[in-house]
């Protein structure tokens, strides 16, 4: 049973035509999952920061089963009570209002947390969640919310972690590019976000078996970074497996946000998903942008 139905129409995008063309309208209407943990409050802060005063942030708490502790290799489940959820929502409202963001809040009493979040996310343009406390393998085993969200991607996805010490959220952005034709759109999105936040941007390309070295496209992308961001932008080409290169590069750059796209891998192939591995193991927040959400 749902206490209040919070689904809403997507709010109109704001900003200039150039910003809209780069896909930043996905930041205008965000659903943020709240469960009373520090990482979920960090998700609220970061979602509010991305959305801004002209967008809208919907807070959703689900009272179903959440992984709590591990005992003898088993994962115990805890059901969140109404009192705790309301307190979590009250604090989340305070966090969001500090950013001047219009909000609504909802408690959904159904028990399947991942199902509820993914269902409700379809009415929004971005889903924000706190980073998982369990390992990637544990999440794969129990069907964790984060793993299911990054595989299903009913909307673009933000997984929030605290920024490195001394670095503000989205102040240093890493864009994970594979030198494909679609990577131009992802880079345009990253550049628009960096311009909007006066941030630094580093494009990282892993030159490995899955992504062949494309000097012409990479050279063109480097020129776009330079012309748009000057000294605040750069390109790094590193040999190796994509997820390892991206994760290590984000750590070395002290990035506070990785922007990556997804190939929508299904079935057994999804176990090799670069975006899913980066979401779980990156040292900072990760924004997974669906290719269909990037403007042409």
Image (tube, grey):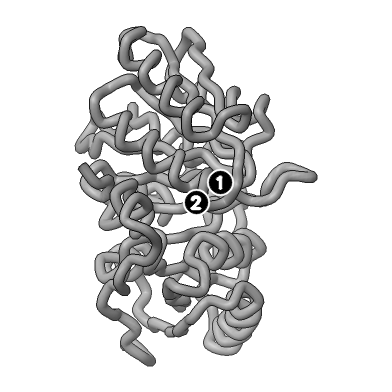
- Residue 190 screen position, x and y as percent: 44, 40
Q: How crowded is mark 1: few (under 14 residues within 10 Å), some or many (20 or more)?
A: many
Depth check: 144 or 130 in front?
130
Q: Which residue lies at the image location 41% right of the left edge and 67% below the top edge?
A: 30
| Secondary structure under the numbered disc 1 in the rendered image | strand
- Residue 145 screen position, x and y as percent: 41, 56
Sequence-wise, the earlier of marks 2 and 1 is 2
| Secondary structure under the numbered disc 2 in the rendered image | strand
Residues tagged 2 and 1 counted as in contact (Cβ below 8 A)? yes
Depth check: 181 or 63 in front?
181
Asked whether the viewer can see residue 88, the reply is no
In the image: residue 185, left or right of residue 292: right
Depth check: 21 or 267 in front?
21
Q: Which residue lies at the image location 39% right of the left edge and 53% below the top edge?
A: 157
- Residue 268 screen position, x and y as percent: 24, 31
Residue 112 location, quadrant: bottom left
Q: Which residue lies at the image location 52% right of the left edge and 52% below the top edge?
A: 196
- Rendered-image quadrant of the C terminus: top left
Q: Which residue lies at the image location 25% right of the left edge and 42% below the top edge?
A: 291
The image shows residue 178, relative to residue 261, as above or below, that is above
What's the distance in space between the residues labelled 2 and 1, CA to CA?
Answer: 6 Å
The tag on residue 159 is 2
In the image: residue 4, left or right of residue 181: right
In the image: residue 168, left or right of residue 260: right
Residue identified by numbered label 1: 285
The image shows residue 15, relative to residue 289, as above or below, that is below
Asked whether the viewer can see residue 195, the reply is yes
The residue sitting at the right extreme is 166
- Residue 180 screen position, x and y as percent: 27, 22
Q: How crowded is mark 2: few (under 14 residues within 10 Å), some or many (20 or more)?
A: many
């Amino acid at each position: 049973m749902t206490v209040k139905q919070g689904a809403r129409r997507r709010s109109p995008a704001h900003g200039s035509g150039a910003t809209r063309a780069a896909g930043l309208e996905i930041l205008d209407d965000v659903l943020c999952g709240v469960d009373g943990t520090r990482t979920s409050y960090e998700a609220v802060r970061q979602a509010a920061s991305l959305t801004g005063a002209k967008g809208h942030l919907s807070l959703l708490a689900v009272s179903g089963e959440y992984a709590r502790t591990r005992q003898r290799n088993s994962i115990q489940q805890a059901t969140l009570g109404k009192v705790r959820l309301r307190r979590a929502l009250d604090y989340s409202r305070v966090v969001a209002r500090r950013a001047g963001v219009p909000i609504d809040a909802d408690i959904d009493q159904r028990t399947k947390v991942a199902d509820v979040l993914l269902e409700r996310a379809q009415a929004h343009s971005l889903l924000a969640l706190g980073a998982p406390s369990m390992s990637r393998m544990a999440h794969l085993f129990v069907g964790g919310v984060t793993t299911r969200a990054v595989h299903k991607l009913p909307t673009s996805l933000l997984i929030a972690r605290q920024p490195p010490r001394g670095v503000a959220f989205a102040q240093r952005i890493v864009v994970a590019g594979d030198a494909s034709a679609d990577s131009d759109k992802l880079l345009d999105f990253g550049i628009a976000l960096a311009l909007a936040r006066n941030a630094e941007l580093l494009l990282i390309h892993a030159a490995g078996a899955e992504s062949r070295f494309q000097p012409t496209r990479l050279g063109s992308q480097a020129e776009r970074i330079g012309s748009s961001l000057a000294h605040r932008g750069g390109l790094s080409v590193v040999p190796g497996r994509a997820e390892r290169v991206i994760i290590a590069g984000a750590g070395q750059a002290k990035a506070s946000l990785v922007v990556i796209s997804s190939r929508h891998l299904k079935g057994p192939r999804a176990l090799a998903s670069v975006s899913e591995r980066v979401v779980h193991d990156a040292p900072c927040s990760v924004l997974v942008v669906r290719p269909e959400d990037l403007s042409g």
